[in-house]
Every structure is written in structure tokens, then in C-alpha cells.
Amino acid sequence: MRSAIHNSASSHDIRGVHGHLAEAAERRGDTYRRVLHRAAATIGPDDEVAGELEKAADLATRHGGYPARTEILLRAAALSSAGTDKNLRLLAAAESAVAAGSGAQAGALLRALRLQGFDDVARGRFLLVQGELDILVPGAGFADRAPQLLAAARILRTAAPARAKQAVGMVFWALVQADDLVKQTSSQEAAAEARLICQLHPGTDLPTRGLNALSTLILDGHAAAAPLVRSAVQESAAPQTPVEDVLQSCMHIAYAAFLLREPVAAAAVLARAERTALNSGAVLPRCRIGLLRAHFDTLQGKIREASEQLNDLAELMSSMGLPDPYARMVLSTPALSGWLGSEVVAREDALTADARAAGYGIRVTSRRIGTVLLREAQGRYVEAWDAAQHIGYGDPLFSGALFVPDLLESAARRRPAGR
């Protein structure tokens, strides 16, 4: 009945109703709905209403998650006069669309932007969004993302420290995905930048504490980092921690806990973040969390659990528009057939070759680790030892650094004398 009345009413009448609803919401003190109804009652550019809508975007995230935030920012841009404000609102909408997993929408918004009037902060934000979208474009490479995101962090370091911390946190995830195929950037370089940003702009918020913990672990070692990591893990579980802080920090805090050989703590961080992402409609963070959880399972030899986790991500990946070759590569479980009992061939399978070509080193290294685990399970310790020798772990962040020393020690204890 309500929809029938709405469809039969003129646009003038509908705007009038929204105007009355805006007044009623103002009397109730409901700022969020007042702004929404006022925008619906407005025709053409109105910078005052556009500004109010932009301010209401954070409230939209609480009410309807990142998809609702995106819609409000798009409406704010539509009501803006041509110029910098309009472009900045389109950029903010693109950022929100990325978090919501709407890659095609975010890409279209970036292409609509005019960059001439952008300052360093806006250019840095643009690079951040572009770095997120690169994996959604066929032909783009995972190995190239880390240097691009690190450049964004450096641009943002002085003028927008919160954004800079977000960027350098994303560098670590890009490094994890590229593993030893990464180009031009090391975890030590990223950790040094994270430390510099946090020294210039200290704080007790979760993003700052998480970056301090991981950068200390990489630069100074486990003993120095352990109390910082455990404190960040505890803070990530606090119910009052803001949603965006949890989503921004969960990856590097969980990874730091895992590097400390505390997988239970890492799993707890990811579980909290996954609930937060689900409640706020943050599709891209949910995918990242699931991928990291599957990676942790693989590194611990839990290949069945990793496979189940990746299967659960298939629908989300599809909704994001990930190109099919990437989706098959990301969602496959390395060495699964071998772990289930069949033979693992020495040469790379087609998906692993595709992963190498795309710079997705996490799959290449995980396959090697899966082979070591399989050989150990079969009691073929000489072959386990030989396979482990081919896993590079010079960089403390790369997956080979996590449990390969343990695998080597185990294989060495069991291999025949003289080998």
C-alpha cells in the first residue's frame, strides 16, 4: 500500500513529504534522518545540504554499514557544486565502495575524478584506493602493490597521519600476499616507515599500537615486541574499540601474534574482526580476514580447515568482481591433493604458475610448505628436508619465516645420518 501511494505521487509531493519528515526528525533530535530527508527534498546543487550529508556518513556506517555510507556520499557529491568538494566526496564514496567490496563501482568513481585540484592528502588517498583496486583489474600484479602503497604512506605522513597509518598497514598485507615475489620493498623498509609515522604522530589508539608492535617485531625481534603485541591483541578485543580501528589493524596485529608463535591469539583477533566486518557490511576486510585465516591454517598443516575457509569465501570473492583467474588462484588450497593422499608432483601446477606470474607469492610458498608437511606425514624425512631447503625465509614477514625453521629441525632429527 505504501509503495503504491509513493509510486502514484508526483515528485513535487514526494519532496514535500520529505521536507515535513525532516522537520519532524529535527524536533525529535534525530540528526541522521533529518539530513536524509532534507537531502531527498532538495533539487539541484546545494552545498549546505551536501556538507551535512558528508558529516552524516559516519552515522550511516553505524546504521547500514559501508554500502549505506557509499550511497550517502554519492548523494552528497550529486548535490555539490562542481569543484574540489565534489571530487573529494566522490573519492570518499570510492573509498567506502572498496570497503563494501564494490570494486566495479569504486573503479567507475575513480575514473570520474578530476585530479588537477587535489592536494597531497587527496593524491595519497587516491593511491590507496587504486592500490586496493589493482587486484580487481586483469593483468595487474600483487607484487607491485607494496611499493605503491608505501609511496602513498610517505605522501600522507605529515598532512594526514591517520591515513598514513592505514596505508603502511596495507603495505604489510601486500607484502604477505606477494611473499618473496615482492618487488622493490621489504618488510624492514615498511617497518621503518611505520615506526617513523608513529614517532611523529604517537597515540594510544589501536592502529598506532598495532603498527608499533609489528614494526618492533620486525626491526628489534621477538623479545622486544612480545609485550607490545600482547597488549595490542588485548585492546583489539575491547568492546569500545571503534569499528574502523578494528578493521584497519586486525591483519597486522594477528600476523604479529602469529610470528610470535601464538596462533590462538591471532585467531581471536581475526574472529573479532570478522564479526565486526560482518556487522558493518565491510566485504573486502572480510575477504582479507578469511584469506589470512586460511594462510595460517596452511602454515600449521591444517589443510582441510584452510580449504573449508576458502570455500566459504568463494561467494564473497564473486560479489567483489575478482577476475576469474585470480579467484581460482586465491581460493585454491596449495598441496591439498597431496595432503589427502595422492602424490604431489615436483613441478608447479598451472595455478601455481599463474600465481607466480601474477606475483601472488603466498600461494607459491604455501605449496612448498604443503609439500614439506606431506613428506613429513608420509615419513619421507629426507625429501622433507630437501624440499624445505628451497623455501626462502630471509625476510621476517614472509611466510617461509614462520614455521620453516621448525620443519627443518624436525626433518633433520629424523633424516638418516650422513644426509
Image: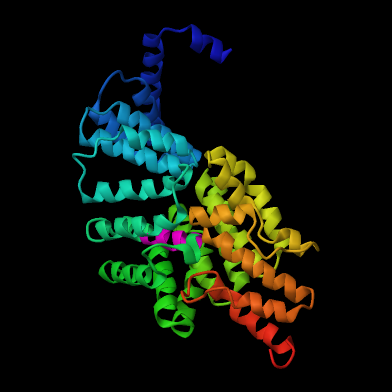
Furthest residue to the bottom?
417
- Residue sitting at x 48%, y 71%: 397
Residue 38 at x, y percent in the picture: 34, 25
Point 47% across, 77% down: residue: 394
Q: Is residue 139 left or right of residue 199?
A: right
Q: Residue at x 53, y 66 (%)?
A: 254
Q: Is residue 303 left or right of residue 239?
A: right
Kindly report the secondary structure that dominates the magenta region of the rendered protein: helix
Q: Nearer the viewer, residue 29 or 114?
A: 114
State the residue in front, 58 or 139: 139
Give the color scheme: rainbow, by chain, secondary structure or one colour: rainbow
Q: Is residue 35 left or right of residue 331?
A: left
The quarter of the displayed image where residue 43 is located = top left
How many circles with numbers are drawn on the protein? 0
Relative side of 1 to 198, left or right:
right
Q: Could you tell me which quadrant the C terminus lies in?
A: bottom right
Residue 254 visible? The answer is yes
Asked if 408 appears above or below 13 in the picture, the reply is: below
Task: Relative to 173, say whether 20 is above or below.
Answer: above
Is residue 394 or residue 224 the one in the foreground? Answer: 394
Quadrant (top left/top right/bottom left/bottom right) for the N terminus: top right
Closer to us: 238 or 250:
250
The answer to whether residue 63 is visible is no
Q: Which residues are magenta?
A: 168-177
Determine if the magenta segment contains residue 50: no
Residue 255 position within the rendered picture, expressed as x and y whole percent measured from the top left = 52, 68
Is 176 colored magenta in this rendering?
yes
- Residue 251 percent across, percent down from the top left: 50, 61
Residue 118 percent across, percent down from the top left: 21, 43
